[in-house]
Amino acid sequence: MQSTRTFRDRFFLVLKGLAMGAANKVPGVSGGVVAFVAGFYEEFIYSLKKVNKKAFALLINGRFKSFYRYINGRFLTLLFSGTVISYFSVSKVLDYLIKHYELYVWSVFFGMIIGSIYYIYREFDDWHYKTYISLFIGILLGISISFLNPAKENDNLWFVFFCGIISVSGMTLPGFSGSFILILLGNYVLLLVDSVNALYDTIADIFTGDFSFIRNNERIETLQILAIFTLGSLAGLVSFSHVLSYILKNYKSITLAAITGFIIGSLGVVWPWKNTLYKLDPNGDYLLDSRGEKIIENYERFIPEWHGETYLAIGYILVGIAIVLALIWYGQKTTTNK
């Protein structure tokens, strides 16, 4: 599988990793949707499933090439390279765009999810009472999650590890937004903002020869939290992939119907017309994160009035749909050429 990938395939796989990583960081958007629509979801799940006892035996015995081939290493390396890069580049751009053009960014994502639903519906043809029930349950769960109230921030390392396991579900389960779950768990700012910024600042300090951060207890504690969160994410990736691989193998139709339901339910989270609700202290003042920015608590959704901004937002929804259709077209063209 690895040797047949052309340079163009490898390049686009890195781009898909960029898209997946960026989607994972945006509350309400699932990186798994990118994998699902772009056509590499099952390969992604089955590759992660290969991280098992046999893989560790190859690694411990020093058979690194065999280990790399066994886990489909080239695929995973290219994909995760794009994902990691996105956290320090694309996601930064997304942070800026959401801050200054929030309505239009949500509109694009809303359109992409609508396009994803269309794609899945078109490809899925095994509808019967079991899959309809599964679809309905998926929709209910997706909608229910979107209206939960967030908890308070918690930096207990066991809880951080648990957050890592749960948050990575957005990569393996389309429609299930890991970053939105972190908001509900109260640790979005701590784990996807403060920790990532601490790592970025530390890398910058190392490159400039400044090692004073070693004496910065707050920085070290934040890096420790990030390390535990990363371990939890890796554990979540491997464990979820084994479970999903089994489910896809034995209950594929029911699973795909549930995934479709999750994605439909997630439309409530990504609804473009909403007011952001921020956390307040007992005096009614805004609570601020380490960057001095307001901490998001949840969203209040509303039906928009018809005016120029609304029409423009609808235009961006159509752009989002077009992006997904383009991805589908590219995937079909690539498959045909092979």
Image: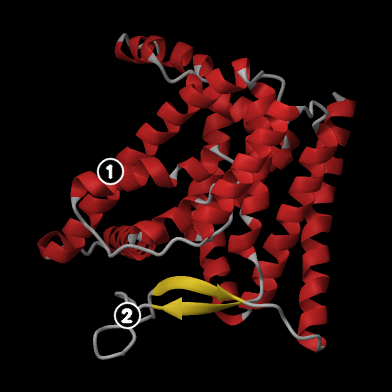
Q: Quadrant of residue 309?
A: bottom right
The amino acid pointed to by label 2 is Leu
Looking at the image, is 298 positioned above or below residue 55? below
Return the residue at label 2. 288
Q: Is residue 10 visible?
A: no
**Horizontal side, residue 200 vs residue 303: left or right:** left
Decide which of 320, 64 is in the foreground and name it: 320
Q: What crowding class fits label 2: few (fewer than 14 Cα within 10 Å), some (14-19), or many (20 or more)? A: some
Contact between marks 2 and 1 (CB within 8 A): the answer is no
The image's mark for residue 211 is none
Q: How far across and down, in percent of the image, does residue 146 sit?
A: 53, 59
Decide which of 257, 27 is in the foreground and name it: 257
The amino acid pointed to by label 1 is Phe
The image's mark for residue 161 is 1
Image quarter (top left, top right, bottom left or bottom right) of the N terminus? top right
Q: Quadrant of residue 252?
A: top right
At a point 28% along the width and 60% down the height, the residue shown is 202
At a point 10% along the width and 63% down the height, the residue shown is 215
Looking at the image, is 214 positioned above or below residue 238? below
Q: How far across and down, in percent of the image, does residue 197 sit?
A: 35, 64
Secondary structure of residue under mark 2: loop
**Horizontal side, residue 154 vs residue 184: left or right:** left
At a point 45% along the width and 43% down the height, the residue shown is 168
Q: How far across and down, in percent of the image, does residue 2 sit?
A: 64, 21
Measure the alpha-carbon separation of dots 2 and 1.
Answer: 24 Å
Q: How is the image coloured?
A: secondary structure
Q: What crowding class fits label 1: few (fewer than 14 Cα within 10 Å), some (14-19), or many (20 or more)? A: many
Q: How far across and down, in percent of the image, does residue 60 sit?
A: 30, 13
Image quarter (top left, top right, bottom left or bottom right) of the C terminus? top right
**Which comes sooner in the sequence, label 2 or label 1?**
1
